[in-house]
Image (tube, rainbow, N blue to C red):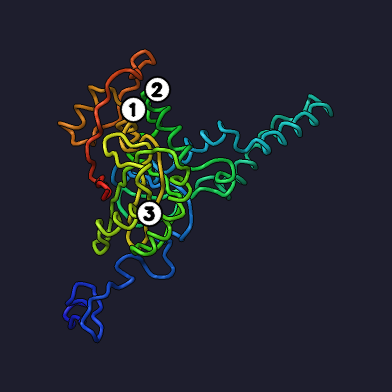
Amino acid sequence: MRGGKRSANDRHGGFDRGGDGVARTKRGKWFKNAGSSAMMPYGVSGVIVTCDGGKEKGALRDVARNLSERWEARGGGGATTSSKAGRGGEDDDEGRGGDAGDALAAELAGLREEAKDPMFKEIGLDLRACSFLKAHKSVLETCSVADLVKDELERAQESGQTRGRHVMRMLPVETVCYAGVEEIAEAAKKLVDKYFSSGLEQTFAISFARRANNTIKRDEVIEAIASMIKQPPNKVNLSDPDLTILVEVMKGVACLAVVRDYERLCKYNLRMVAMTEEERMHAKTVMNGNQVPPVPRSKDSAPKDDEPKEDADEDADGEDVKAPE
């Protein structure tokens, strides 16, 4: 308030100091009021999308479209398509001289119905250049979001086309929990049991990043997760791990996932993975990894499997850390 007295909380930078003198972060620092949509529900799955600042809507639209196509390519929505095809066959049998306007109206009605319940729905985070798409339960019943994101990255790597002008990184999320060390460890245990209980030898790394949160400690999170993974047979490998555990802290929530080929696919940076080696080197050394999307290249110029690939540089969103052995 102009000309008014500052409260004790304001003087302490938004922290509530209790009777014991300990600073407690106010919920309003991470979240808006109860009517805000800037809250990510616990337990959801989806994908974090980073992009050029101010282009969040366009980036989310492109990612939702592309991942929906990857889902359909894996057999998603097959029942719906078959039922539509069956109805179309019946209509053809009744009469082939149907009104084209009726068919167009039916198609538009279907699109409007799909828009009411999309396969990937935006959840507002009130963060610049960072958004979240929640995956529909129909998607999760068919495959994991991590598989869809990996499919799209490999398509971009092969074709040299991002199909998302402003998209930068696509980070899968398997579960969401409160951003506390104990809560993260509890959520991570389910992922560890899922991916590291086979007894096979696997290499792994842990990637930690945080946004709009300066209270949670990286080392504490890393130690809590790494202590659950049996070593051996599992071993740490930061240069090219088989599995990478992603921990993305945003405001008051933590997003966790386990992904494959994290380093080979440029830390799941869509823009970087679609570049040639020369374009990638230029982006790293001159443009700090924030180069405009590459010009589409022919299939012949796509990188070959036997060509040496350079490890992706650190990007501003996160930091890879070595798990304690």
Q: Is residue 216 left or right of residue 80?
A: left
The residue at the far right in this view is 94
In this view, 305 is above or below 316: above
Q: Is residue 62 visible?
A: no
Element at label 2: helix
* Mark 2 lies on residue: 159
Say which mark, if any, is on residue 118.
none
Label 1 – label 2 distance at C-alpha = 7 Å
Number of residues whose C-alpha sits closer than 10 Å to that of mark 2, classed few (under 14), some (14–19) or many (20 or more): some
Q: Residue at x 34, y 55 (%)?
A: 227
Q: Residue at x 24, y 41 (%)?
A: 315
Q: Which quadrant, please, contains the N terminus? A: bottom left
Mark nearer the viewer, 2 or 3: 3
Please name the amino acid that badge 2 sits on. Ser
* Mark 1 lies on residue: 274
Q: Is residue 82 visible?
A: yes
Q: Is residue 102 left or right of residue 113?
A: right
Say which mark, if any, is on residue 228.
3
Percent position of residue 246, x then y: 35, 47
Number of residues whose C-alpha sits closer than 10 Å to that of mark 3, classed few (under 14), some (14–19) or many (20 or more): some
Element at label 1: loop
| Number of numbered discs on residues | 3
Percent position of residue 147, x then y: 47, 37
Percent position of residue 86, x then y: 76, 32
